[in-house]
Image (cartoon, rainbow, N blue to C red):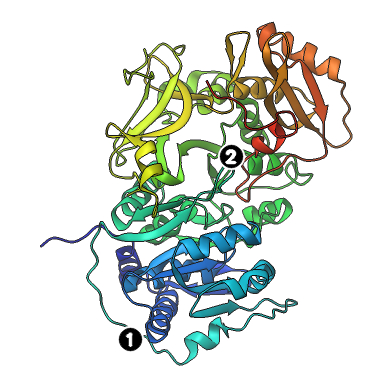
Amino acid sequence: MFSPLTPLDWKRRAIKYYPQKIAVMDGEKEFTYQEFGKRVDRLSAALHQAGISQGDHVAVMLPNTHYMLECFYGIGQLGAVMVPLNYRLSANDLEYIIRHSDAKMLIVDEEFTKPIEEIADNLSLEQMVIVPVSGQNTSLKGVFYEDFLEHSGEDFPVVEIDENQLLTLNYTSGTTSKPKGVMLTHRSNYLNAANFLYHLNVHHDDVYLHTLPMFHANGWGGVWAITAAGATHVCLRKVDPPLILELFETKRISLLCGAPTVVNMLVNDSKAKEIKIKTSLRMATAGAPPAAALIKKAQDILGLNMIHVYGLTETSPFILYCEWKREFDSKSAEDQATIKARQGIELAFNGETKVVHQDGEEVAWNGKELGEIVTRGNVVMAGYYKDPETTAAAMRDGWFHTGDLAVTYPDGYIEIQDRAKDLIISGGENISSTEVEGVLYKHPAVLETAVIAIPDEKWGEVPKAIIVLQPGETATEKEIIEFCRSNMAHFKAPKAVEFVEALPKTATGKLQKYRLREMHWKGPKKVN
């Protein structure tokens, strides 16, 4: 009577109960769940005919299209392992990941074939499948996706899934070292997606916009959860704020996910105040601690019901969410935004998460004692692929150590203060770069900001603010510093300010602070 936990089973359920419901919208294309299921089965059959079997690894480098969704199901139901690739990585990083992951095949979007062309001779892939894109042309030798499926039929061997076997092998960005392969199982993906379903209140009538790259921690689980509810996936090839705002209206989007930088792009778009959203629109945000001022803007301008979640690729990814209590409704909009900026409490299905001192003892629930977030339970990775030493370093004493520094409030809500490597220690005082950024976002001229530590002869290191100004706005270094000093303890205020055109980010919108620090430090910044 035992049935293994796998998110692949939700495809079966969706086809059984919602065969004629629109499953996927991708530009002008639409597929019902029945049509989507047949395409997935044809992909599985084609992969099987091409020699892919249980336990084999298939790398996939696609944007948020129906092809990418098909791969999440078509590869997995063979018992094979999907390796989602970040299409913004360098050719060298892609070569390392493809070789390190032991991928036998690559499915790639034609727009992103250039770096693969550079490294093709160094890869030992058995086959490449190319998704053609109008206006693009590649020199890669491979078969086009629809041709690959054309003669496959829909029959493939039924494999017995072990819930503890790998479903996906997701690589971290590798900002300070080689990318690491995070091993996520059918079970961990299932339970994370269950958290997505429950805590983001996913229901059958939802229309979900894939603003978050599906390659990033499997779209946070959205690739599975939306199917589980029989809701509708709306694909988005790239983040385009005017298009997203248009889709809010034309497709009646009800749910989306994205990093705070995506929220920032939306609320600052010229069309944001013009659109008329007819649905109750909610958005989950994570990837970097969002400033309370940004959350308030999203609520005021777009009416977005912001849901703050937190996690890491290594945890499938959700381990905290900011649960909204009815008692918060009576608070001011500013106080509500401050609460929503907190990472929050454990989700129902992930296991245990807490903040601890270096000796492993939990910090006091006073909102002051700083410690590291650690977690254990159902969603933690099986380990780093072919890297037992790094796995052992991250998973110590029965806990996965996140490297994120936080406090716990009296109600148990956790709030990140900084990454360990981003914490600024000035004259022995701890300064949270996130706290300083939160103040800066209240300044009307600030569009985006990142605060880093820079060397200082007297204090060892001090905060510096790097700022992108709102279009048409001006500000001076002195004005910014005085604004911060009037809104926080003087020692926390930036000692220097630099105005730039843009901040370096990853494909998922995370700030790459290490690139900013490299301009000021010789070698890596010392972490105490």
Determine the image quadrant of residue 464: top right
Of 417 and 381, which appears nearest the observer? 381
Residue reaching furthest to the bottom: 151
Residue at image coords 52%, 26%? 420
Q: Is residue 245 left or right of residue 24?
A: right
Mark 2–mark 1 Cα distance, whole angstroms, equals: 44 Å
Q: Characterize the local packing of mark 1: few (<14), some (14-19) or many (20 or more) Cα atoms within 10 angstroms.
A: few
Q: Is residue 206 visible?
A: no
Determine the image quadrant of residue 367: top left
Residue at image coords 29%, 37%? 351
Residue at image coords 59%, 77%? 131
Quadrant of the rendering where the N terminus is positioned? bottom left
At label 1, the amino acid type is: Asp
Q: In this view, does 19 lie to the left or right of 516?
A: left
At label 2, the amino acid type is: Leu
Of 461 and 486, which appears nearest the observer? 461
- Place of residue 527 in the rendered image (x, y in percent of width and height, measured from the top left): 55, 24
- Place of residue 521 in the rendered image (x, y in percent of width and height, measured from the top left): 70, 28
Determine the image quadrant of residue 466: top right
Name the N-terminal-most of marks 2 and 1.
1
The residue that mark 2 highlights is 304
Q: Is residue 5 visible?
A: yes
Q: Give the number of the mark in front: 2 or 1.
A: 1
The residue that mark 1 highlights is 155
Q: Is mark 1 on a helix, strand or loop?
A: loop
The image shows residue 385, relative to residue 470, as above or below, that is below
User: Residue 168 bears which disc, if any?
Assistant: none
Of 415 and 328, which appears nearest the observer? 415
The image shows residue 374, relative to residue 254, as above or below, that is above
- Place of residue 30 in the rendered image (x, y in percent of width and height, measured from the top left): 54, 73
